[in-house]
């Protein structure tokens, strides 16, 4: 075994309506083999599925593992901050609850890494030809070559993703997640911007977790719509950190904007039906997102 650069670790997993017993058990075995001081905390953000809650209770039977059930759903940003406050150790490893750890040396790679501050391990996408009708799978698989460690490091703050990262407790205390983001979408983008403002060290390495679960197309499109509404809300603060915002801001001719909005009003629903269907056309995905963002008008209270 390699010499470990780090000797203690809190593994923190925000969870909502996902059974993550297998994920926790695998991580617990890896941590035991390393012989480090560790704990695994799963923060349940007021899940609503009783069977999921029941199954996750078995996490409490694993050594050094604990399921913490919150009474109120506050979103992933607040849950990450909550878990950070509950953690005992200096190094915090945040993982999404719906991923798979693809290798037996996953924790070892993090614990032998000598970087400080924030270490982002990245993601990889399972090979699943049977999912060729799944929009999110198609999108993530097409984008995968652009998310190598080298390419992420070239824009280390803009490319931060909260699916799989390690952070020093002191960095999280100085730069917590923005809890105004109560729904998933762009909270990690804002966090990357805040890390840059704090001057935090961010290093991207090749230690990915694997995405193997992809929601049905209508559910994914609902999530995309919600995230675009969030982007609109925080557009003034996220400039320079969103390609959609950058593209929209570079359209300076009113007539072009008007035509793009008209296009979305006429064809947006038809495009959305395609993206929700069994044969989604990936080229239409960014067209839809830009049109939705340009046309979105928040309801007045």
Image (cartoon, grey):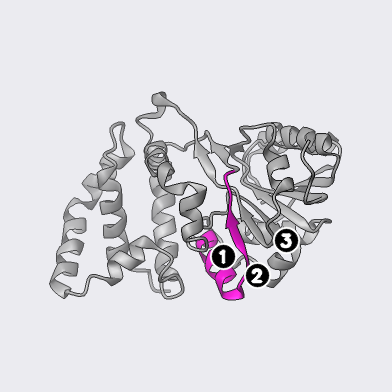
Q: Earlier in the sequence, mark 3 or mark 2?
A: 3
Query: Residue 34, percent across and down?
Result: 81, 38
Q: Residues within 10 Å of mark 2 (few under 14, many from 20)?
A: some
Residue ID for mark 1: 191
| Residues under numbered marks 3 and 2 in contact, where contact means CB atoms less than 8 Å apart | no
Asked whether residue 185 is in view, the answer is no
Residue 261, horizontal then vertical, whole percent: 20, 63
Q: Residue at x 61, y 74 (%)?
A: 198
Could you tell me which quadrant the C terminus lies in? bottom left
The answer to which of 200 and 173 lies nearer the viewer is 200
**What secondary structure is found at the residue carrying circle 2?**
loop
Q: Nearer the viewer, residue 166 or 88?
A: 166
Q: Is residue 38 left or right of residue 263?
A: right
As measured in the structure, the alpha-carbon distance from the residue carrying label 1 to the one carrying label 3 is 14 Å
- What residue is shown at x 25% (from left), y 46% (from top)? 284
- Element marked by disc 1: helix
Is 80 magenta? The answer is no
The disc placed on residue 175 is: 2
Disc 2 and disc 1 in contact, CB within 8 angstroms: yes
Image point (45%, 52%), residue name: 151
Q: Find the magenta span and give its range.
A: 187-206
Q: Which residue is mark 3?
A: 168
As rendered, which of 182 and 21 lies closer to the eye? 21
Q: Look at discs 3 and 2 and give the one toward the viewer.
A: 3
Q: Looking at the rendering, which quadrant does residue 64 occupy?
A: top right
Measured in 3D between alpha carbons, the distance from the residue under mark 3 to the one under mark 2, in whole angstroms, is 11 Å
Q: Which mark is residue 54?
A: none
Q: Position of residue 3 (x, y in %)?
A: 79, 44
3D distance between C-alphas at marks 2 and 1: 8 Å
């Amino acid at each position: 075994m390699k010499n470990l650069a780090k000797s203690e670790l809190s593994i923190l997993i925000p969870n909502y309506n996902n059974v993550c017993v297998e994920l926790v058990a695998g991580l617990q075995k890896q941590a035991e083999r390393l012989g480090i001081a560790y704990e695994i905390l799963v923060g349940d953000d007021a899940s609503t599925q009783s069977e999921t809650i029941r199954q996750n209770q078995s996490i409490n039977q694993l050594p050094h593992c604990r399921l913490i059930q919150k009474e109120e759903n506050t979103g992933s940003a607040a849950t990450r901050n909550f878990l950070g406050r509950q953690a005992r150790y200096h190094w915090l490893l945040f993982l999404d609850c719906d991923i798979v750890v693809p290798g037996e040396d996953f924790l070892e790679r993090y614990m032998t890494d000598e970087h400080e501050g924030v270490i982002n391990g990245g993601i990889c996408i399972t090979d699943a030809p049977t999912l060729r009708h799944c929009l999110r799978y198609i999108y993530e698989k097409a984008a995968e070559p652009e998310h190598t460690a080298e390419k992420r490091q070239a824009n280390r703050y803009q490319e931060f993703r909260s699916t799989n990262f390690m952070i020093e407790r002191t960095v999280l205390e100085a730069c917590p997640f923005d809890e105004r983001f109560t729904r998933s979408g762009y909270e990690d983008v804002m966090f990357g911007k805040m890390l840059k403002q704090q001057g935090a060290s961010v290093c991207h390495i090749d230690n990915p977790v694997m995405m193997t679960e992809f929601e049905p197309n209508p559910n994914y499109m609902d999530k995309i719509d919600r995230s675009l509404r969030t982007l609109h809300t925080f557009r003034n603060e996220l400039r320079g950190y969103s390609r959609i915002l950058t593209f929209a801001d570079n359209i300076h001719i009113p007539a072009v904007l008007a035509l793009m909005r008209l296009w979305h009003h006429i064809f947006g629903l038809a495009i959305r039906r395609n993206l929700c269907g069994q044969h989604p056309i990936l080229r239409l995905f960014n067209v839809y997102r830009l049109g939705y963002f340009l046309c979105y008008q928040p309801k007045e209270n």
